[in-house]
Amino acid sequence: MNIVRLIDFLRDRLKTVIRLCYAVLALLVLADIVRWALTPATHEAATEGGEHAAGAWAALYRISETAPGFWSAFGFVACALIIILSKWYGHRGIMTREDYYNE
Amino acid sequence: MSNFWIHPALIMFVGAALLPLVPERLRKGFLLLVPMLAFARVMSLDHGLFGQVAFAKWTLTFGRVDKLSQIFGYIMTLMAIIGTLYGLHVKRVGEHIAAWIYVGGSLGAIYAGDFITLFVFWELMALSSVFLIWFRGRKESLSAGYRYLLVHMTGGVALLAGIVIHYHETGSLAFVALNVTHAGLSTYLIATGFILNAAVPPLHAWLPDAYGEATFNGSVFMCAFTTKTAVYALIRGVPGLEILVPLGVIMALYGVVYAVLENDCRRLLAYHIISQVGYMVAGVGLGTELAINGACAHAFAHILYKGLLFMGCGSVLHMTGESKFTKLGGLYKKMPLTFVFTLIGGLSISAFPLFSGFVSKSMIISAGFDDHKFWVGFLLLLASAGTFLHTGLKVPYFIWFGKNNCEKKTWEKAADPGWNMIAAMAIAAFLCIFIGCYTPYLYRMLPYNVPYHPYTLPHISETLQILLFTALGFFLLLKKLEPEAVISLDLDWFYRKGGAAFLWVARRPIQAIDSFVGEIYRIVGLKGLMGTARSVGEFDNAVIDGAVDGFAGGFKRLGASLRRVQRGAVQENLMVAFAIAALILVALIFVF
């Protein structure tokens, strides 16, 4: 099976694959920085949606429109938050033994 | 009066009624033919009002065809083809009949132009889909099915009460947008009926309970029809109802949290339905043209990728008999094709560029930002990260890679499923990618003409950053995510464990509700409708000895006998009874 061979091929070179993945992540952030550096005009223009709105969410929106790499940080923090908070919540008694409902 | 207008639902009903009579060697062809005919019928519909019949002092409209009903009719019949193909090898005719009546109920509700028609088909969906749970045949399936019925009957009562009050207030039964700026009791009751079916917390716990317990192909049907018909009803009935925005956002996050804790892959997917429908509900609440378009587009895309995911996990369950992460793992060598298809579903739901979710989900998020509701946009993006984390990463990783927890028996049984299941997954996977790559296909069907371009550089960059850094987080925190052999308590605890009072209710739920509904019917003089509703539920004994003790008797017996006799005469009798019931229903509704 070709799919299996491809997966095995990649698994045998796991170190290289992981390095490649890191490279992709780095490139992604780099590209975002380049985009930001090349389009200075958007610094003002991009805030049109949120410039009049007040509050923390609006502030966050303005940051998201200007700061390079914002969404990388957002993705990582979101992931960590979801895992840690959910597990914390689950271990407060929400997760229970599998036969809990059996009489 | 256009008496010869053929309703797409009618094709499904007649097909279901004829199915037991079709000889076995022709059955597979017939199984494919009927949903295809329904699909072709939907494609050939002209816009307008059809199938209008006088009923007592009202005019019932069975066929309101416009852009909104068409996009939902299109995707529902398309999914009926895929779902039937996926279960093509299932020998038990009753399962196909139940699924088709369920599809017909959904189509009936979608094309309904008045509240009475809507309500009848709405209830029909619950009554037929419960069989998809019961046919699993486990002891747990029986009680899960009863709980499913109980909850949906309650929702039906809320909906009916809302309709009755609405009628008294306005004198109209037309199913059009209700007054949401000065929403009164009737609007909220109707909306409650809708959001229960859409599984909005706190009225959501029925969904993972039922979908995790249904048959391997029953869940494929269930994941598409109930919640998305409810989304349609919300779009039609209460667009712009403010409260739906926070509810939708809570839903999107709630599903994600429980998905972290879940050990059963199908229950995990079920929690992600709640999460994804949250986007649509929020979109309906925002109510702008872009948001409504987004809700429609996302429902369309969602039906395909969620169907695909349930087919992938259903294949694992079907082949190995296991659906728990703690009993699976490392299966890529055994089920490579299933892995690839499930991954495509996972990438679609996660909204990767070039996959369907990317072009639909972002519409709703953009609508939130455009409306200056920044919190909506950010929290929905947070939920997107969670979606990828689970459906794109956790599901594939812990089933096909990760630690191999398979018992010897599981491992030996594991293999890619039969041709029809593979073909159904391949079609769904193709459509997921096609929608993502060729946007006009989906966008042309949307109800409003709002230009939207998902493929802009900032949007692609933003999406890739969020998703890939979520992936980084996943692999760094992999240890914390190891599945645990537990179940998670949800709000269904209240009706499963909530003390003696609830036990009493649970023991006699349907009788109580039935007499309550009966009372309402009696008060408002809807006796005739009651007859229809009763014959839907009762087929078994109604035909023989008339209405004596309501739904409960018939259903209790049916459920119990389904469980007791796995294979045998009861099934055959049931099928016949079911077919007769379908015929009676068709007769009642269409010949009236």
Image (spheres, coloured by chain):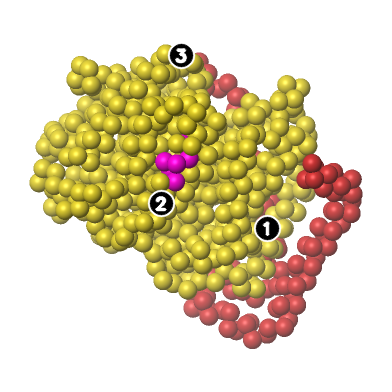
Q: Amino acid at mark 3?
A: Gly
Q: Numbered disc 2: what chain?
A: B
Chain B colour as displayed: yellow
Mark closer to the chain start, 2 or 1 = 2
Residue A48 position in % (x across, y down): 53, 80
Disc 2, SS: helix
The label number, if any, that marks residue B42 in the structure image: none
Question: What predominant SS class does the magenta segment belong to?
Answer: helix
Question: Are tags 2 and 1 found on a single chain?
Answer: yes
Mark 3 or mark 1: name the one nearer the start of the chain: 1
Q: Label 1's element?
A: helix
- Residue range (magenta): B31-36
- Determine which of the numbered discs, if any, sits on residue B467 in the image: 1
CA separation in Å, label 2 and label 1: 38 Å
**Residue A40 drawn at (x, y percent):** 68, 85
Q: Which residue is mark 2?
A: B40
In the rendered image, which residue does mark 3 sit on?
B568
Q: Is disc 2 surrounded by few (<14), some (14 to 19) or many (20+) residues within 10 Å?
A: some
Q: Is residue B203 toward the left or the right of residue A34 in the image?
A: left
Is B425 drawn above or below residue B500 in the view shown? below
Choose between A72 and A13: the one closer to the eye.
A13
